[in-house]
Image (cartoon, coloured by chain):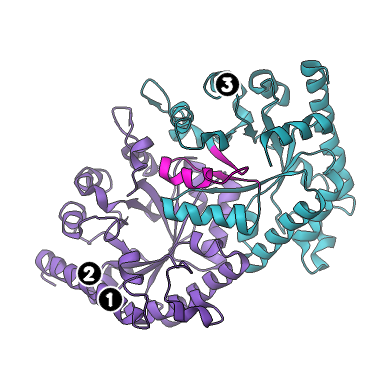
Chain colours: A cyan, B purple
Amino acid sequence: MTTQQLHEQILQKKSFLCVGLDPDLSKIPPHLLATEDPIFEFNKAIIDATHDLAVGYKPNTAFFEAYGIKGWITLQKTIEYINQNFPEIFTIADAKRGDIGNTSSMYAKAFFEDLNFDSVTVAPYMGKDSVEPFLAFENKFTIMLALTSNEGAFDFQTLITNGKELYKQVLETSKTWKNSQNLMYVVGATKAEYFAEIRKIVPDSFLLVPGIGAQGGSLSEVCKYGMNDKVGLLVNSARAIIYASKGTDFADRAREEALLVQKEMEGILNSKFQV
Amino acid sequence: MTTQQLHEQILQKKSFLCVGLDPDLSKIPPHLLATEDPIFEFNKAIIDATHDLAVGYKPNTAFFEAYGIKGWITLQKTIEYINQNFPEIFTIADAKRGDIGNTSSMYAKAFFEDLNFDSVTVAPYMGKDSVEPFLAFENKFTIMLALTSNEGAFDFQTLITNGKELYKQVLETSKTWKNSQNLMYVVGATKAEYFAEIRKIVPDSFLLVPGIGAQGGSLSEVCKYGMNDKVGLLVNSARAIIYASKGTDFADRAREEALLVQKEMEGILNSKFQV
């Protein structure tokens, strides 16, 4: 997928919602537990109920790996289901990978080739040669952690180095890497006031924004400071949508929650772009 | 496993060698490709040939994930093979994970419970709440990246913040986290002169040291500056051992290479501890 295609999908659906798939056997509706692959059934129902309201899905690999081989099979079935049925959807493997060069190449193969995701999240700590192997894939995107939505973000990401916060240095340095046009960044919604500063460094990049909903971030604040003239935002919501109900109505309730977010996004897009 | 048990194994085997399992279908002996699970056969042969010379094995998860479901099955077979046949061995899932708290909990379950590794490597960028879920597991170890062996280590890890390099800040901050006694750290062998400084901050912690062999680090230099009175080092070698030969003699050649390292370690231990 290209960013142009992603942008067109956003304008068409009037949505820049990404639905996070963090499926936990202890949280999904109990009636699904009798099926052969409860997590796949759950994901499939959520996807079927929300695909016209969302432009992306973000399976969180931890929630699959926790179930071992069975979990990895479910992850593969989930991404195949999306790719086969909704090829317009932008898919994100939320994996937070990153290692020395030859290892990162293997991770890139795992997510871009074997599983055929459009993008993968990576951590920046190991620097240039840990990220560039991902960037070498054409029309695939590497979404690097910049400023995350959790409390621990303030442990290291906001430390001052070279006169600026580390996450700003990470953004600036990453722009010098080969194929940096394939970078997107994770910026947490819980820190909306930071978006203005971030946009000075990466005006054109897509930002993946977790932290709306369960983590407490405000959509309108994020858009006020973070939106660019190509929208440039993918706002993720997981728990608030996928766990809206534990009953047999869970998919309908997920759709209702997704629709609320999409409608708010539509309003913002209409006011900003007169679409 | 406890650190005391690991220490006893080191003294008994006169070795603090960890063998990295980075199995790549394009690099393993071609005669194995005809078997049902070439990578498992490769790992098993390497483990059988070196288990008395090594105290740890470190499967690199990227090299399994790159083969999808089949790779994850191989990873599970490999860890089960070690745990069942060589329960004294310290096992490391080299996975470089780390995410917000509820996600890190799932990764911890994946590696500590489902796969039953003794330890897992994690990245520090997301801070305290991304690492503490791993630390909550008793007699399991969380090996956090401090100063890595690659070129990109100098992109962010050595930036000065609060008057010291970021990796030193990472070490210091991590000592304040809950159950920090379950932390070990990754420190690359290619930067031996840094070990003296690191030992001032974490005198008692085990350090996992990649970068010996293919990456060019010196064992004697690492030991000179990095060894503490409980040894406190696990030195990893992967490519130099596991790819010593592409012929049918690969396991014998791997043993020869491992023996060279073990003998050098034995000399160092004898001179330092009169064991």
What label sits on residue B261 in the rendered view? 2
The part of the chain drawn in magenta is A118-144
Q: Chain of mark 1?
A: B
* In the image, residue A23 above or below residue B268: above
Q: Does label 1 lie on the same chain as label 2?
A: yes
Question: In this rendering, would B223 be left or right of A96?
Answer: left
> Residue A89 location in percent, x, y?
76, 44
Classify mark 2: helix, strand or loop. Answer: helix
Residue, x 53% and y 82% (percent of image)? B35
- In space, the residues marked 2 and 3 are separated at their CA atoms by 51 Å
Dot label at residue A205: none
Residue type pointed to by label 2: Val
The subunit carrying tag 2 is B
Q: Position of residue B227 (x, y in %)?
A: 20, 57
Image-based side of A9 in relation to B130, left or right: right
Amino acid found under the numbered disc labelled 3 = Arg
Question: Where, by quadrant of the figure, is residue B21 drawn?
Answer: bottom left
Indicate yes or no whether the magenta region holds residue A122.
yes
Marks 3 and 1: in contact by CB < 8 Å? no
Residue at 60%, 49% (x, y): give it: B103
Residue underneath mark 3:
A199
Indicate the chain on which mark 3 is placed.
A
Residue B102 seen in the current view? yes
Which residue is denoted by mark 1 in the rendering? B53
Q: CA distance from mark 2 to mark 1?
A: 9 Å
Q: Are marks 1 and 3 on the same chain?
A: no
Q: Observer-nearest residue: B42 or B170? A: B42
The nearer-to-camera label among 1 and 3 is: 3
